[in-house]
Image: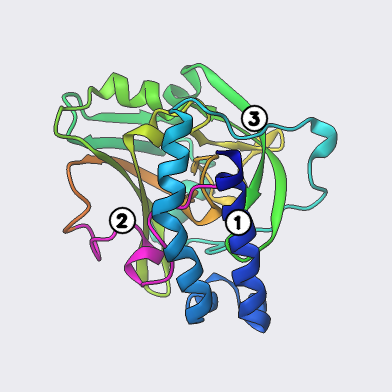
Amino acid sequence: MSRLILSRRTLIRAGAAGAGSLLLSGCDKLFENPTFRGTLESAEDLHQAAQRALGRDALAREFAASDMSPAFRANGSREVADPAYRRHFAQGFAEWSLRVDGLVDKPLTLPFTALKAFPQRTQITRHDCVEGWSAIGQWTGPRLGPILDLAGLRPQARYIVFHCADLYHGRPYYESIDLIDAFHPQTILAWGMNGKPLEEAHGAPLRLRVEKQLGYKHAKFVTRVEAVATLGGIHGGKGGYWEDNGAYAWYAGI
């Protein structure tokens, strides 16, 4: 079964090689290559089944501090123009809060102090980008599962949607995962990176870390966490910015 998981990374690298110079242009150009898109789409069902067969608690590899990359590339949006975000940024996010709502019994408004009052998890993991590069970094934040438990998911909830403060190419950025990944032990809402608060380029004040999926699923600048029964009707209806644009598959397990 591990061969199936590892082959996802092999397929990505093969697709990236086929995309050639498109690597220089980043994720928003790679999906225009039909060979690369087909590689990811054909692997989605196989690898989702393989990941699920391993069980909900199968862990992504964690590394030692000595393995951390000397530089960790920032991808996607590196800054946010939204006036409310800029105001919070200038104040060090002292008055910023995370919304948790949707199909929950108790909608939450969680300021930073509340997020840091949850038990914290620190993990050193490898970030695998769909472009074909990887980096190892340390992430700190509360697990998503206990936050959802506090809010009280309703029985109809099947997916968790992460709404972000940034616009990418003029469109709202968002992502989503299912409940199995939401309650995975390594799925956290990270506010810290490499022992320091997140920088803006890496998604301050809060980003998703869903360690068993590719980098484009790790939404940055998260402002709202919404529990939903279906992804239909949310923006393009396919569960994420790149998915709506026909770029990548919704499930990006590695």
Magenta stretch secondary structure, dominant: loop
- Asked which secondary structure carries label 1, the reply is helix
Q: Which residue is mark 1?
A: 201
82 is within the stretch colored magenta: no
Q: Is residue 189 above or below residue 86?
A: above
Return the x and y of residue 197 as percentages of the image width and height. Answer: 62, 38
Q: Which residue is mark 3?
A: 123
Query: Which quadrant: the N terminus?
Result: top right
Residue at (59% x, 39% y) in the render: 2
Return the x and y of residue 212 as percentages of the image width and height. Answer: 53, 41
Stretch in magenta? 234-254
Of labels 1 and 3, earlier in sequence is: 3
Of labels 2 and 1, earlier in sequence is: 1
248 is within the stretch colored magenta: yes
Mark 1, mark 3: which one is toward the viewer?
3
Residue at (54% x, 52% y) in the render: 214
Mark 1 neighbour density, 10 Å: few (under 14) some (14–19) many (20 or more): some
Mark 2 neighbour density, 10 Å: few (under 14) some (14–19) many (20 or more): many
Mark 2, mark 1: which one is toward the viewer?
2
Q: CA distance from mark 2 to mark 1?
A: 23 Å
- Asked which secondary structure carries label 3, the reply is strand
Q: Which mark is residue 239?
A: 2
Return the x and y of residue 5 as percentages of the image width and height. Answer: 56, 45
Q: Is residue 104 above or below residue 206?
A: above
Instruction: Say left or right for 15 vs 83.
Output: right
- Asked which secondary structure carries label 2, the reply is loop
